[in-house]
Image (tube, helix red, strand yellow):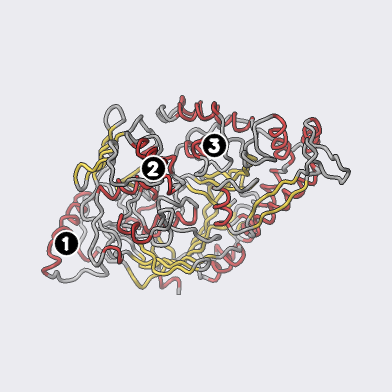
Amino acid sequence: MCLAVTALSRNSLGPARPASRNRLVAWIAHATAFVLAIALPITPTTVSATDMNKTLRVAFPVDVTGFDPQAVNDLYSAHVANAIFDTLWEFDYYARPLRLKPSLAAALPEISADGLTWIIRIKKGLFFADDPAFEGKKREVTAEDFIYSWKRMLDPKMISPTLWQIDNKVVGANELVAEAKKTNKFDYDKPIEGLKALDRYTIQLKLTRPDYTLTELMLGYNWSPVAREVVEKYRDPGGRIMNNPVGAGPYRIKQWVKGSKLVLTKNENYREEFFPTEGEPEDAEILARNKGKRLPLVGNIEISIIEEANPRLLSFKSGALDYEFVGASMIGNVVQGGKLLPEYAERGVRHQRALEPALSYDFFNLDDPIVGGLEPAKIALRRAIIMAFPVDDYVRVTFRGQATPANQIIPPTQTGHDPKRSRNVRQDVQLANALLDHFGYIDRDGDGFRDLPDGKPLIITRSSTPNPTDRETDELWKKTMDSLKIRIAFNTQKWPDLLKQARAGQIQFWGLGWISGATDGNSFVQLLYSKNIGQSNFARFRHPKYDELYEKAQLLPIGPQRWALYRAMNDIAMAYSVWSPGVFRFQNVLTQPWLLNYKRNPFRQHFFHLMDIDETRRR
């Protein structure tokens, strides 16, 4: 669940030395189990090591903010965090319908009949990437590392943006959190009844109530383990390690030039993991070609920060990028009439288009003295602004048709979306102006612009980044405010800076995207839960009935009863005009003919460790 602009050895097998005898025995046992599992013979020659001479090249449109798994949740940092940190389980990449498979865990969780006690067993022999914090020793991942990391989400000083995923859910945690708020220090050594390591590799999690979305939430890197030694060596005053990530995933950071480039290289301590064995019929060739190959396949990942869409596309056309998520502003240069242009098709470039599990919306800061508040006049102001905005032009101009107007909080990709709901708001400038007149937003000093009911100037300040898409959106909002005779100002800054301001409640009006890594709509309705203010509730919306419905929904299994509460929450959000609803957007991906193994997963964009490059075709 991530914010977005407008979201895993050895080099070769050789003769065994005495010191590596145990490792070789373990490898033979694993290979034998692998053979039995797929009922096909695999000779040792089919097992290949990571190719360190290969580099996968991609580009991001905005800079990353850092890589502390318990402290970040913007989309682009998430892409990197997913490569550095491993998770308990993950989506089986080629299987459809989507299903989970163990990753760091030895199996999916064992959950008691009442849903309150979870037993999670992790694999033995998992290691963090090497780091000076470990003083030259290999550091095994243990159950205690998970418990320490999950406590970090609870630590008030961390201000974890994913606190909502664990808050009020663990038996005994609230008492420790309350104590930390009083003393300004979280006692990581103090036991929590609901978080225990039964042994070195077994976690016991006791919940205050059943949680029917928790298994999927744990797909997120924020549930990944970090080592306490690393945190204590590199932490900032807030306890975060944004610049020094050390994980157990397939890659580690080799080079980071902020605002420019990020290079990842294989984590030599990455667990023994092989290419997937199951998929759809069209995946048969990929599965056969990669059978028995150890992951990751490519040794290096090079990520360039290229903010402008046109240079990114030109880089792809030149072959400098292996795949590209084409922004809406450039899609007409790639696809026309639903078909890939010949200049791409003739080169073997492939194109995929699908609706994202995402919502792009504009939020008002409900704590702001001008646009905030729940009294009728403030609701009327927000409602008028929403009504005057030309969302159809927004889809046509800014998104080039690669979106559809949003009519609810939950996208069509998620369970809980209501396909029968009609469009809530259509552009009506005349009615919007009449609404403002009725509530006293009139021109009191004769300068041609409306003033507040108390006579003070009415100025709406919209925040945005300097990229071309935001500039186009700003133009639409300028026309919108002009049609209402409302002054508008713009707070234009880089994405990381705006994100910090928004979390601190310092932004009046801004457009964001939220993308989910899970299948249920709970990730979207939590965006307006009052206890998530400072984390994911950027609108700073507080409404007792909304909170009551949200909390009731958490007690219900995934299904119609729960979704009915989602619909009621959506009605409240629309009635108070908390957001300009925005759009559900499409994603367009171009892949080069030499990029191998790519298959779109709707809930995660990058699976670096599974990708491969045919260097002969690239040359």
Residues 187 and 333: in front is 187
Relative to residue 478, is residue 277 drawn left or right?
Answer: left
- Is there a contact, CB below 8 Å, between mark 2 and mark 1? no
Q: Which image quarter is the C terminus in?
A: bottom left
Q: Where is residue 566 in the image (x, y as percent from the top left)?
A: 51, 30
Task: Name the residue nearer the viewer: 37 or 264.
Answer: 264
Mark nearer the N terminus (2 vs 1): 1
For disc 3, the neighbor class at 10 Å (few under 14, some 14 to 19, many from 20) is: many
Front position among marks 2 and 1: 2
First in sequence: mark 3 vs mark 2? 2
Q: Is mark 3 on a helix, strand or loop?
A: helix
Residue 23: where, in percent of width, then height? Answer: 16, 61
Q: Which amino acid does label 2 sit on?
A: Ala
- SS category of the residue bearing label 2: helix
Q: Mark 1 points at which residue?
A: 23
Q: Foreground mark, 1 or 3?
A: 3
Q: Where is 559 relative to 580, above or below?
A: above
Which of the 4 image quadrants contains residue 470? bottom right
Q: Residue at x 21, y 68 (%)?
A: 13
Q: Which numbered circle lies on residue 180?
A: 2
Q: Return the disc, 1 or 3, that comes first in the chain's sequence.
A: 1
In this rendering, does residue 97 appear at all?
A: no
Residue at (23%, 62%) from the top-left corner?
A: 138
Q: In which quarter of the image is residue 251?
A: bottom left
